[in-house]
Image (cartoon, rainbow, N blue to C red):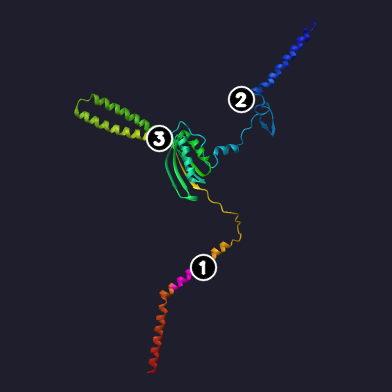
Amino acid sequence: MRFAPIALAAIAILAAACAGSAATSAPADQIRTAYGQSQPGAFAATTSGQSGPVGAAVPQPASPADAQKAQAGGNLAIPAAFDPDRMLILTASIAMQGKDPWAAADRAQAVAVGLGGDVVGLSQSGKGDAKTANLTLRVPSARFTEALRQLRDLSDTEVVSSSVDGKDVTEQFVDLDARLKAKQAEESRYLSLLARADKIDDILKIDQSLAQVRTQIEQLTGQLNSIKQRTAFSTITVSITPVPLSPIGPDPKGAYDPSKTVQAAIATLAVLFRVVADLAIWGLVFGWIPLVILAGALFVQRGRRVTTAV
């Protein structure tokens, strides 16, 4: 009994220490849970060049420059997102350079087919180092951005320029759909009238009006199907040209090059020969005129001498 107060005080001190330790470790456990880490020290963040345990620091966000570069996708314009509630006709045009444009075109076709699309057009021309390829791809609109990313990452190619365009046809689609429903309701009314008609003249008139309404229904249905098809698949045109050959060795500006002097001399000699040839042609064409004038002058002078002698 004499040691009971001492035991109770020791138990109280021990309980307070345990509570402080639990309170200290709670934030670290929460941070590990937020980042999917279950073991202490499994994730270490760096702040101002120092690393520490999870509870000491949090991961630093990417810099704005890195985020902008990642979003831009290098030289290829890749849209961040499209509104899924709008009907958009998406098109893209990409100009690329590659070591082997024909092989790059084959890889681009594989990208489209792998994403559930197809190849609409393909043309290849040239030979050797002058090969070119142009192709038109269709990919599902839901995977349009993924297709652009994969085309950007094609091996042995570089994107020179690109453009992405989206045409919003939501209002047009809604208008066509409303007109179609109105025509379908009108068709139902004509069918009801046709079922109750008992005169030949009435039947013919109703049938004629019904044929016109059905023609309009088919036209509206075709327009709606066309919009659905164009919005369900996006079109990407790709042109691939060879990489320009770089000059062999350094060519400092203003350096002496004897070959250029020889080329200039040959060009000047060719111009000189041309001038001489032109003068010869002019002499042959108009050279007789001075001779005729000289002969006439001599003839007149000789006639004067004969007259003077007489």
- x and y percent of residue 44 in the render? 66, 29
Q: Is residue 230 above or below residue 11?
A: below
Numbered tag placed on residue 203 in the rendering: none
- Rendered image quadrant of residue 174: top left
Residue at image x 49%, y 50%? 128
Looking at the image, the residue that sits furthest to the bottom is 310
Residue closest to the eye, 152 or 169: 152
- x and y percent of residue 149 in the render? 52, 38
Report the amino acid beneath label 1: Leu
- x and y percent of residue 248 in the render? 57, 54
Residue at image x 40%, y 35%? 229
The earlier-in-sequence mark between 1 and 3 is: 3
Residue at image x 67%, y 32%? 46
Tell me the element at label 1.
helix
Q: Is residue 258 above or below residue 101?
A: below
The earlier-in-sequence mark between 3 and 2 is: 2
Q: Residues under labels 1 and 2: Cα distance?
A: 83 Å
Q: Is residue 308 magenta?
A: no
Residue closest to the eye, 142 or 63: 142
Q: Are marks 1 and 3 in contact (CB under 8 Å)?
A: no
Numbered tag placed on residue 269 in the rendering: 1
Numbered tag placed on residue 229 in the rendering: 3
Pointer 1 local density, CA inside 10 Å: few below 14, some 14–19, many at least 20: few
Residue closest to the eye, 281 or 286: 281
Tell me the element at label 2.
helix
Label 2: which residue?
A: 34
Q: Which residues are magenta?
A: 271-280
